[in-house]
Image (cartoon, grey):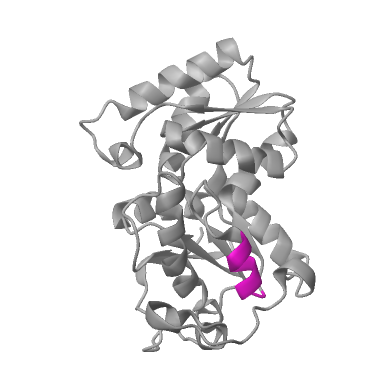
């Protein structure tokens, strides 16, 4: 099978981190195609960034049929544009927050998401409520900019570790969920350091995507995720008219060309 992993921000180095995490966990017969959004913010930190990340995300998702993707993953812990993406696509679309929270619920009664900025904490609390986990899951912010995770000179990783320590002590968390796709490369060392399960949403999403594809499931097309109605879109959003977007190809002039980080057969 082939899984399309979309980084909805425009930072290619973060796509590299995400792709590596996805490929490490993918099954032997799974291909990972990781792409970077062609438009939008360099990082997604809060509601405003999220809104402007969705158009680029949908442009990349629209290419899934041409790319032969069997499932797609939105690699932002805000589950950016998840409902719109599911309405657009027939294939399963997985958000890494929903995947991580669902996976952690199998192994811990109480757990904490540790995310980046304080402005991201409340949106994640809303997602936790939506996913039915408010009684079991706390959300903390380490107050670190997303892109600082890419900077070796930053103290971001030390601040992340400090917040995890507080979660274990004050929340009595039994497991930790990393609340940013840019943290995906830290899972193994944090598990060893703290001695508790540490869950990365990218890895959880890959395994859930593989499961859904293996079960032969697709996104429901009645009700909430029904195919968007064909209607004119005007001005700068003309390219997002549903019938045009759903008919776009990977090399079509209707959409900007994806920035493909890597395609590989997992070994």
Observer-nearest of 115 and 105: 115
Q: Is residue 260 left or right of residue 199?
A: left
- Is residue 88 magenta-colored? yes
Q: Residue at 67% x, 75% y: name it.
A: 90
> Quick one: which residue is furthest to the top in this view?
169
Quarter of the figure with the N terminus = bottom right
In the displayed structure, 249 sits above or below 159; it is below
Q: Is residue 16 left or right of residue 73?
A: left
- Please provide percent x and percent y for residue 231: 58, 87
In the displayed structure, 59 sits above or below 20; it is below
Q: Is residue 205 left or right of residue 248?
A: right
Q: State which region is magenta.
A: 83-90
Tell me if I can see residue 123 in this picture. yes
Observer-nearest of 98 and 199: 98
- Is residue 158 magenta-colored? no
- Please provide percent x and percent y for residue 140: 52, 26
């Amino acid at each position: 099978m082939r899984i399309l992993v979309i980084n909805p921000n425009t930072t290619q180095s973060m796509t590299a981190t995400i792709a590596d995490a996805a490929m490490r966990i993918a099954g032997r017969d799974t291909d990972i195609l990781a792409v970077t959004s062609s438009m939008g913010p360099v990082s997604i930190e809060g509601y405003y960034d999220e809104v402007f990340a969705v158009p680029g995300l949908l442009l990349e998702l629209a290419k899934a049929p041409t790319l032969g993707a069997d499932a797609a993953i939105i690699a932002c812990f805000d589950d950016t544009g998840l409902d719109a993406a599911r309405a657009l696509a027939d294939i399963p679309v997985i958000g890494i927050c929903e995947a991580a929270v669902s996976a952690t619920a199998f192994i811990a009664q109480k757990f904490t998401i540790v995310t980046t900025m304080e402005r991201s904490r409340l949106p994640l609390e809303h997602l936790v409520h939506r996913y039915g986990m408010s009684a079991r899951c706390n959300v903390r912010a380490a107050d670190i900019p997303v892109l600082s995770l890419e900077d070796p000179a930053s103290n971001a990783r030390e601040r992340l570790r400090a917040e995890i320590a507080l979660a274990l002590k004050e929340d009595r968390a039994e497991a930790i969920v990393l609340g940013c796709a840019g943290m995906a490369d830290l899972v193994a060392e944090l598990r060893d350091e703290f001695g508790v399960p540490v869950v990365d949403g990218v890895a959880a999403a890959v395994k859930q995507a593989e499961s859904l594809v293996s079960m032969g499931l697709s996104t429901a097309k009645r009700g909430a995720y029904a195919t968007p109605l064909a209607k004119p879109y005007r001005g700068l959003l003309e390219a997002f008219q549903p019938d045009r977007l759903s008919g776009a190809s990977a090399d079509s002039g209707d959409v900007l060309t994806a920035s493909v980080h890597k395609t590989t057969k997992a070994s």
